[in-house]
Amino acid sequence: MNYLLKSIRKLKEDALSKLMYDFLKWLLIIIVLFSASIFVPKETTIDTFLSAILHISTYKAILIIISVVFITTAVISTFYKIRLKKIQGDFQTDELTGLKNHKALTPYLTEKISATKRGNQILSIVLIDVDDFAALNEKVGYNTADEILGKAGRLLGNDKRATDETFRYFQRGDEFLIVLNETSMENAMKAAERKRSLIEKTAFEINGEVYNITVCCGVAECKIETDNYETITDRAHDALKSAKKVKGKNSVKNIV
């Protein structure tokens, strides 16, 4: 059923794209013809107009053709760039939370690590995992658990500085990863603790029922000399595992 709905939606989007293309094409033609008509004297007849066209210089004809082609290409190119940007944005956005997904995370974090090394700056990441999410799935059902996860993700996405970026780590997982630019380990620990406390204190209401969850956080700071995407995320995973071992979980740990 989902496949059928996606196919219908894609068909509608493709039809809309073609419709917009045809609309822009004919709109451009009308604008060009209207603009040209402004410069044509009112007393001009079809015969005199055709005669004028036949006597137009080759240079002017080429110039007009190039202008029309350039304007048409620019308009269509702009339209498709906007369309492509939207498709790319959809491709890199997690539907449940509205956050950027793992496809967006890998190139983003890789580039931020490289920039950190080039500028001799600081960078930290926080890996967040919902405590006992599998048990929550069994207790309240997958749909309700997903809604809770979606709200938690949006909450984390809104709790950030302009320089931070929040991602859903995997499509079907209950982990989130936050990239904290220009942030030391000390300040990243404070940020992680704030986010842990925020989740703990938030009552998530779903269909009239209120649910509370907790999370664990693993924090790692980028090592300029040796780190890459794999090594820094591995340390964040190790820190998260350490936090999960705390009695009652709901804690923050770091790996230096």
Image: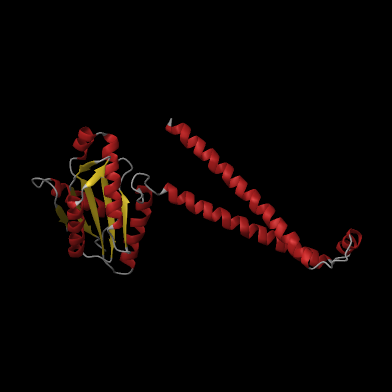
Left or right of 177? Residue 214 is: left
Left or right of 183? Residue 68 is: right
Within the image, what quadrant is residue 63 found in? bottom right
Q: Tell me which residue sits at (20%, 43%) in the image.
A: 211
Within the image, what quadrant is residue 186 found in? bottom left
Q: Position of residue 217 (x, y in %)?
A: 19, 52
User: Furthest-left residue in view?
Assistant: 247
Establish if 212 lies above or below 59. above
Establish if 178 lies above or below 208. below
User: Which quadrant is home to the N terminus?
Assistant: top left
Left or right of 81? Residue 140 is: left
Q: Tell me which residue sits at (52%, 55%) in the image.
A: 82
Q: Is residue 116 visible?
A: yes
Q: Is residue 173 visible?
A: no
User: Furthest-front residue in view?
Assistant: 208
Left or right of 179? Residue 24 is: right
Q: Position of residue 78 (x, y in %)?
A: 57, 58
Q: Position of residue 23 (x, y in %)?
A: 65, 51
Pick the residue in front: 235 or 147.
147
Q: Position of residue 46 (x, y in %)?
A: 88, 59
Pick the residue in front: 234 or 167.
167
Q: Tell me which residue sits at (30%, 55%) in the image.
A: 157
